[in-house]
């Protein structure tokens, strides 16, 4: 994505419950009683669109949230329970006009045929603004909810057994994405004729079997949903190390990474580009977004005090998988520009407290970035692929 002029900075927000800090639901204005209402989610996405953000991601899972990486916990002082992310996105799509909608999909226990249909439908409902964030799960309790497979117990992240399990799950996720994309292509763009005078609704020659045969899936196709408006909605994933970096290189349009400084960002981007080259995708665009949890206030001391107060409510300092930024919108803008110079093409910000930090992003950070000339003043495209500068892909099955 190189050009003579700097490419625009892309900005997304990750929405999860009342925010990424586990005590966020106890903050004034957090609206914990509204979490399971469509109005709550409509308000969040509408606010994100007010800030001209590229897209929102919506977290999801196949078991109750847990403070433990592999097992359920017994905590009763944190948000538990959620709505389905794809259905949230479909509900808020008609209430928004330009912002992209990227729900999380857990590949480990769902079927690619079903998800291809669901995301294609979201693309139609939104007028070409759909994507998905593909995720794996190695939790035994979640496997037990489905009863079709078992997942070995993982005792330590860095054990050989854990690496083997996770590698297999990410290989499965790569095949999953391939099946989904082939199903999106299984209808040519002009397969539907809809000519009442001749009685021809469809051209059957323009529907194609995908005949995918792999270690994890055997899918014949075609889909039952015509090709989405974007051709292929965007696919994104979160990655922290070599195995998920390989998934980004093989299968993603957008990857989310968690470097803590510019040097680490440069190294991570280099590793992902190497995986992209190894997958034979050197010529394909792949955005790499930095993930940050943000506590934003007009004064740095206020931001630190708020974070400390939330940590006290939670009973321990906040520590997640992504770096945490605590400070002012102007300081965050400085930080993003420094990281961007290391090869990141955008950022996915995780509001620590959505009620507080999402408006701080849309109403303070965005104007600061606009003032610096690095962020849009108006939406320049109607589709998510358009906002990200990604061309609409040709159908792999259409005759040339």
Image: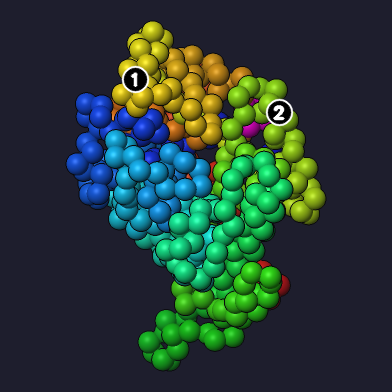
The foreground one among 301 and 194 is: 301
Residue 382 appears anywhere in the view:
no
Q: Is residue 270 above or below residue 122?
A: above
Query: Where are the magenta residues, as a range?
Result: 340-344
Q: Is residue 41 above or below residue 355?
A: below
Residue 231 at x, y percent in the picture: 55, 62
Q: State the mark number for residue 266.
A: 2
Density class for disc 2 (Cα within 10 Å; few <14, some 14-19, many ≥20) is some
Residue 393 at x, y percent in the picture: 62, 59
* Corner quadrant of residue 296: top left
Whichever of callouts 2 and 1 sits on the residue coming sooner in the sequence is 2
Direction bottom: furthest residue: 198
Q: For the residues marked 2 and 1, what is the alpha-carbon distance in whole angstroms?
A: 35 Å
Residue at horizontal 42 percent and vertical 81 percent from the top? 194
Quadrant the N terminus occupies: top right
Q: How is the image coloured?
A: rainbow
Residue 339 at x, y percent in the picture: 61, 24
Q: Label 1 belongs to which residue?
A: 312
Q: Is residue 322 magenta?
A: no
The foreground one among 63 and 110 is: 63
Residue 37 at x, y percent in the picture: 22, 49
For numbered disc 2, what is the local secondary structure?
Answer: helix
For numbered disc 1, what is the local secondary structure?
Answer: helix
The foreground one among 101 and 355 is: 355
User: What kind of secondary structure does the magenta stretch mostly adopt?
Assistant: loop
């Amino acid at each position: 994505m190189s050009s003579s002029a700097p490419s625009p900075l892309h900005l997304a927000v990750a929405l999860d419950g009342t925010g990424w800090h586990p005590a966020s639901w106890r903050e004034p204005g957090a609206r914990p009683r509204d979490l399971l209402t469509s109005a709550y989610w409509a308000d969040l996405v509408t606010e994100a669109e007010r800030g001209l953000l590229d897209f929102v991601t919506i977290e999801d899972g196949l078991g109750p949230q847990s403070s433990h990486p592999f097992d359920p916990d017994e905590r009763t002082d944190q948000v538990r329970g959620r709505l389905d992310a794809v259905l949230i996105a479909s509900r808020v799509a008609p209430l928004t006009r330009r912002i992209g909608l990227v729900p999380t999909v857990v590949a480990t226990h769902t079927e690619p045929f079903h998800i291809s249909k669901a995301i294609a439908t979201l693309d139609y409902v939104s007028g070409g603004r759909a994507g998905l964030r593909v995720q794996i799960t190695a939790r035994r309790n979640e496997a037990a909810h489905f009863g079709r497979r078992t997942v070995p117990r993982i005792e330590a992240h860095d054990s050989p057994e854990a690496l083997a399990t996770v590698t297999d799950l990410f290989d499965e996720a790569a095949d999953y994405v391939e099946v989904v994309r082939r199903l999106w292509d299984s209808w040519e763009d002009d397969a539907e004729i809809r000519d009442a005078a001749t009685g021809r609704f469809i051209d059957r020659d323009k529907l194609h079997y995908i005949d995918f045969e792999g270690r994890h899936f055997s899918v014949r196709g075609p889909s039952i949903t015509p090709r989405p408006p974007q051709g292929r909605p965007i696919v994104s994933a979160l990655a922290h190390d070599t195995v998920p970096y390989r998934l980004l290189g093989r299968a993603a349009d957008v990857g989310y990474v968690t470097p803590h400084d510019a040097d680490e960002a440069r190294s991570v981007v280099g590793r992902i580009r190497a995986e992209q080259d190894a997958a034979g995708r050197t010529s394909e665009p792949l955005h790499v977004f930095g993930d940050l949890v943000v506590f934003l206030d007009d004064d740095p001391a206020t931001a630190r005090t708020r974070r400390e107060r939330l940590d006290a409510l939670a009973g321990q300092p906040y520590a997640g998988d992504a770096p945490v930024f605590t400070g002012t919108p102007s300081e965050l803008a400085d930080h993003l520009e420094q990281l961007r110079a290391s090869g990141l093409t955008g950022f996915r910000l995780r509001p620590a407290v959505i009620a507080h930090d999402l408006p701080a992003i849309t109403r303070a950070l965005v104007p600061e970035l606009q003032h610096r000339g690095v962020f849009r003043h108006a939406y320049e495209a109607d589709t998510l692929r358009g906002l990200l500068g990604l061309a609409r892909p040709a159908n792999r099955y259409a005759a040339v």
